[in-house]
Amino acid sequence: MDIGTTLPLWSVIPFVGMLLSIAFFPLTKPEWWEHHQLHVAAFWSLVFLIPFTAVYGFGIMLEKMGEVVLLDYVPFIVLLLGLFTVAGGIHIAGAPVGTTKNNVIMMAIGTFLASFVGTTGAAMLLIRPVLRSNAWRQHKTHIVVFFIFLVANIGGCLTPLGDPPLFLGFLRGVPFFWTAQHIWPLLLLNAAILLAVFAVLDSRYVKKEGKEGLERLELQQKASEKIKFRLEGAYNFIFLAIIIFAVIIKGVIGTSYGDPHHVPGITFGEEVHLGFDWFLQVALILVAMFLSLKFTPKKLREDNEFEWEPIAEVARLFIGIFITMIPALALLSANGSNLGVDTPLKFFWITGALSSFLDNSPTYVVFLTTAGALGADAGVWTTVGIVTERILLAISAGAVFMGAITYIGNAPNFMVNNISQSNGVKMPSFFGYMKWSVGILVPVFIIDTLLFFL
């Protein structure tokens, strides 16, 4: 049933309320928010579900819930959980002293890793070694800021494993390697510019450390010589390979059958079809996760200060996001061609602007749905319609890159900020961080626009 033609515009209020809650409660009532995230998600979900059920009936409600929870939320959260768990079993013992050269190298490595272990996995794996490397410094806010830019956001643009928005696109038919084939010039350009700017700024901050800073640097260099650099828990990369295989094989199976609904499996109602590829992907990722938990010594996770709360928070909030975005997606699917968003430039900036202040995952889905409703004759086939390659590139880049504009644009941003503060780094406020991001990232995105989206 196409509910998008009959849903009123005000039905998106719970979706907006859910996203605004995520944006402002952590800033205004942080302690209350920590204990009531699931309550807030349940509240906004019920604000949508109760009137929706009253109008459309219990059967339609169950079908729409099954579609968004089973087809989107479950594989989404299972993938994040798998990557988070496996990355948490890899420990970097010993860290190079935080000189400008070493910092650039660590940033570059993290940017590359993010596309394969996820921005959350790469950020959690590397933020503590980066902080240890720069323990001798007093001025290190800029290091964390650029870490958020590159490792927690921009670096995750190559594969569906890298950033949740791209995984949701993969679930909607975007080929696994499509993004890597088309976005790599943008990644290289942005990473090169940002690493160059970081190197200049970092070298200046090193000079500000003065004589006392150089003494601290010398002491840390002597201490680091006693701790041999080594990678512990490297066998977790085998489990990571299982996760990558699980995601790829699902796409291969779906493509071989032409239509996801043709894959043998279980069907609920008209829209919810769970093919054996769905079960295979979920099972393989969970197996990889449990193998990591079984074979990784507890001490390695303790050394990583591994805890479940970051992924638990994502799970609590995203169930509310996925449920409340049902009407938004339905409305856009039915009316997207009438919104006037029809060029790569518009999709890049509008997707990016909303990804900056709302979560970039639902924003990506909303505008992918909008693009699918434009009725293109050629391009990339998705379950929401055919999308031209330049528009799909613009949506992908806007969602992934501009999630770095604020702390709330992407889940790892807040995680990195919290870990850094707990390690004594004086992090900027919400708007203080935006001074950095607007001043540095927006000019880079203007260059992207001129070269790729005009």
Image (tube, helix red, strand yellow):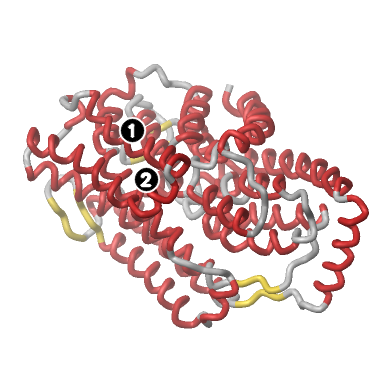
| Residue depth check, mark 2 versus mark 1: number of the one nearer the observer | 1
Residue 258 x %, y %: 30, 49
Helix, strand or loop under label 1? helix
* Residue 213 shown left or right of residue 5 in the figure: right
Identify which residue, 1 or 301, lies in the foreground: 301
Q: Which residue is mark 2?
A: 173
Residue 215: tell me if it is visible. Answer: yes
Say which amino acid is labelled 1: Val
> How many other residues sit within 10 Å of disc 1, few (<14), some (14-19) or many (≥20)?
some
Q: Which residue is mark 1?
A: 16
- The numbered mark, 2 or 1, whose residue comes first in the sequence reads 1
Residue 403 x %, y %: 52, 39
Q: Do the residues under discs 2 and 1 have CB atoms within 8 angstroms?
A: no
Residue 367 x %, y %: 39, 32
Q: Answer above or below: position of 48 versus 81.
A: above
Q: What residue appears at the point 53 percent right and 53 percent down from the top-left corner? A: 415
Residue 248: tell me if it is visible. Answer: no
